[in-house]
Image: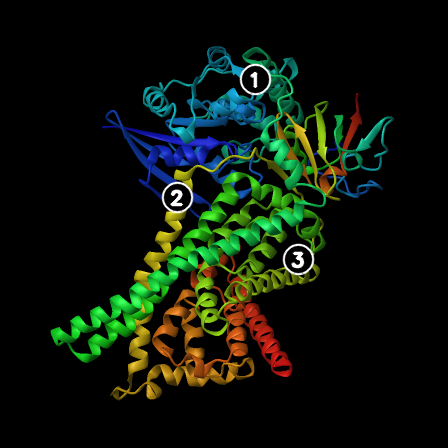
Amino acid sequence: MRIDINRGGFMNNTCRKHGRGCAFRNNCDLPEGCVYLNNVKENTNVELEELCNNGRLRRKLQEMGLTKGVKFTVINNTHNGPVVISIRGSKLALGLGMSEKIMVKKFA
Amino acid sequence: MNKINAVLVGNPNSGKTTLFNRLTGSKHHVGNWPGVTVDKKEGTVVYKNNEINLVDLPGIYSIFPFSIEERVSREYILENEVDVIVNIVNASNLERNLYLTLQLLELGKPVILALNMMDAVEKKGIEINLRKLEKELSITAIPIIAVKDVGKNELLDSITEISKDRINFKLDYGEHIENLISKYMVKHQDYDERWIAIKTIENDEVIKDIIKHDFDEDYTNQITSKKYDYIDELLEKVIVYKKNNYIGMTDYIDKVTTHKYFGIPIFLMIMAFVFFLTFNFGGIFVEKLDFLFNDIFAPFVDATLLKMEVFPWLRSLIVDGIIGGVGGVLVFVPTIAILFVFITILEDSGYMARAALIMDKWMRKIGLNGKSFIPMIMGFGCNVPAIMSTKALEDENDRLVAILINPFMSCGARLPVYAFLSSIFFKGYEAIVTFSLYLLGVLIAILMAFIFKKTLFKSEESPFIMELPDYNVPDIKSVSIHVWEKVKGYIVNAGTVIFLASVLLWFALNYNFAGPSEFVNSFGAMIGKSIAPIFAPLGFGDWRAALTLISGAVAKEIVVANMHILFGTTINLIFSPLSAYSFMVFVLLYVPCVATIGTIKRETNSWKWMFFSIFYQLIIAWTVSMLIYQIGLLIF
C-alpha cells in the first residue's frame, strides 16, 4: 500500500511530536544537526531539511519557495510566535504552528 | 475597432492596482465575481484604434487555489476568452515573482511581462538584462514604473501587438518527469496538453473537472523545486548586482516597527495619531459645512420657498426633512474622507502586514492569528470591505469568527453619531469620548472572538503565513481614486437611501391615519412609543430615540439625520450626558447597517449566521448599554 504523504491518508501512525498532521508519521526524530525553525535565533543562516507540514499548507510553503535544500536567513524571532525569514529575495512571516514543523540545518 | 481582452495578473504588492488605475483612470467599475464577493475590477482603455478591456485579478502568488481569491483568478484565466495575460512583476524581487510567471507560461496563453518598479531596481544596484530575459522565457518584457507612468505606452503597444500564437516556452523537468508528462498529455480544445499533463502529475484537483484521470502519486515537490531552480539559473544569467550588501530602508524601518518591545507602542501611537487627526482636522471642516448648511443654506431655501408661496407642508418637508436629514449626513464627508485616506495609506504602505505580525502573539491568545487583525483595522473605515477582506484567511472557522466580530469595529458612518452627540454633551472632550467608544468596540470584539473560539468554533491553531512587502510611499493618485470611490458611495447613499429615509420619517412624523397631525400623535410616535419601553433601562426610553434606532439599522448615519429632524434644539431635554453615552454605546454595538448585513449573508453564505449576527449583537448592545447606564447612575 502506498502512503501519500501530501494528503494524509494514514491514521494509525501518529507522530509523537507533531500529531496526526505530521508527514513523517511516527518517525519524526530530528536528524543530527537539525532544529525546528521556531528555535532558531535571529541572523542565522539555515538550510531547509524537511517540511513536516502536511496537505495544502505543505504545498503552500513549497510554492512560497520553501523547497528542500533552499538556504535562507532568520531575521526576526522575538515575537514568541511568527518567525520572519528572508527567503528568495523577500520576507516571509511564518506562524508558530508552521515554524515548529519546519526542520532546518544550520550552516556557517 | 479591434477588441482585446487583457487580464492583469501578479503577486500581491507588485503594483498591480496602481498599474490598473493608471491605465484605466477613473473609467473602471468594480463589481463582484459571480458567487463570491471578491472585487472584480474592469476597465476599458482605448488605444490606437483598439479597445482593450482590462480585468484586474486579485493578487496571487500561485495559480494553485489556496484562498478564494486564488480560485477566482485561476477560474477566470482558465475559463474566459483571454487574449493576453499581462503579468506584472516586482522587478526588484524577481525570484519570487517569476514563479507565478512560469506557471502562467505553462498555461500556453500569450503572456506579456511588465517589469514594475524599475526605479527600485536601480536603487538596489541591480541590472537586468532584458533582452536575455525575453529570450530565455520567449516572451515580451516591458520595463515600467507604474506610479510614474513610465513605460505605459510601450506596454499598451505590446498588448495590441501581441500575436495570438501560442507560447513556446518549455521548462525541462528532467528525464523521469518528462517521461511522465509525455505519458499524460491529453489533447483538449481549451487547454494546453502539456499543462494538463503537469497538473495531472501534480495531482491538482482542477484537472478532475477537465479530464478524467487516475494518478495517485504527487510530484508537486519536484515540479515546484525545479521551477525555483530554473529561476535561480535564469537570474544568474540575466541579473548583475552592482552593489553588494544593499540594505534598503525597509530593513531599517522594520528594526523599529517590528521590535520586540517598541512594535506595539508604535502601532498604538500610529492609530492614536490617525484617530485624533481625523477627528480634530476633520472637525474644522465639519463645523464650516455645518454652518453652511444650517445657518446659510437652510434659511435661504426656507425664505425663498416662503416668497414663492409654496404649501407650508412642502416647505417643511424640504427644509426640515430633506435638508435637515441629508445635510446632517453630508457635513461629515470630510471626516470620513480623512479616515479613509489614512486607512488606505496604512494598507498601501505595507505597514498593515507588520501590524499583523506584531499582533499575532495577542491574537493567538484569543484563538485567532495575526492576519485576522487586518480586517479589524479596516473595519474602522467600513465594515463591508473589511468583512470582504476576511477572504485572505485560510481557516474557515477563523474567517467566520472574524466576520462575526467585525461589526463591533466602529465604522466611519458611526463617527458622525459620536461627533454630533459628544459635541453637545461632552464639549471639549469629544476626542476622548469618541476614542473610548472605539476602544470599547475593540474590547467587545476581542471578548466575543475569545468566546466564539472557545465554544462555537473550536479549531486547532490556524496557519499564519504572510509576506512582508517592502515599504513604499503610497501613490497619491491610487489613494485618491480609492478614497473617492468610498466617499462617493457615502454621498450617493446620502442622496438616495438617506434622502428616502428622511422623507419617510418626515411623513411618519407629520401624519397619522387621520391625515396631518401633531408630532406626538403621528405614525412615528406610535411606532416609537411601542418599543421605547425596551430602552428605558438604558436611559433613553424616549420614543424619538427609539425611532432613530429603528431607522439607523438601514445606515448608521441616518441616526444623525433623524436627530436633526426629530430633536431640533430639544435634545438636552431628552438626554443627559450619561444617557447620551449609553445611547452612543448602543449605536456602536447594535445591528450593523443593511449593507454589512448583506455582506455577512454573502460571505458566510448562510441565513443562519446572518440572523445569528443580528440577534447576538442586539443582545450585547442592550446588555452593555444597560450596564453602563445603571452603573453610571450609581456613581454620578
Pick the front one: B14 or B41: B14
Q: Residue A22: horizontal and vertical position, in percent?
A: 77, 38
Q: Give the residue number, with chain letter if any, for mark 2.
A: B480
Image quadrant for the C terminus of chain B?
bottom right
- Helix, strand, or loop for circle 3? loop
Quadrant of residue B238 in the image?
top right
The amino acid at mark 2 is: Ser
- Helix, strand, or loop for circle 2? helix
Q: Nearer the viewer, mark 2 or mark 3?
A: 2
Q: Nearer the viewer, mark 2 or mark 1?
A: 2
- Helix, strand, or loop for circle 1? helix
Image quadrant for the N terminus of chain B?
top left
| Upstream in sequence: badge 2 or badge 3 | 3
Question: What is the C-alpha distance between the residues marked 2 and 1?
Answer: 51 Å
The amino acid at mark 1 is: Ser
* Residue lying at the far front of the rendered structure: B428
Q: Give the residue number, with chain letter if any, for mark 3.
A: B457
Q: Give the residue number, with chain letter if any, for mark 1.
A: B182
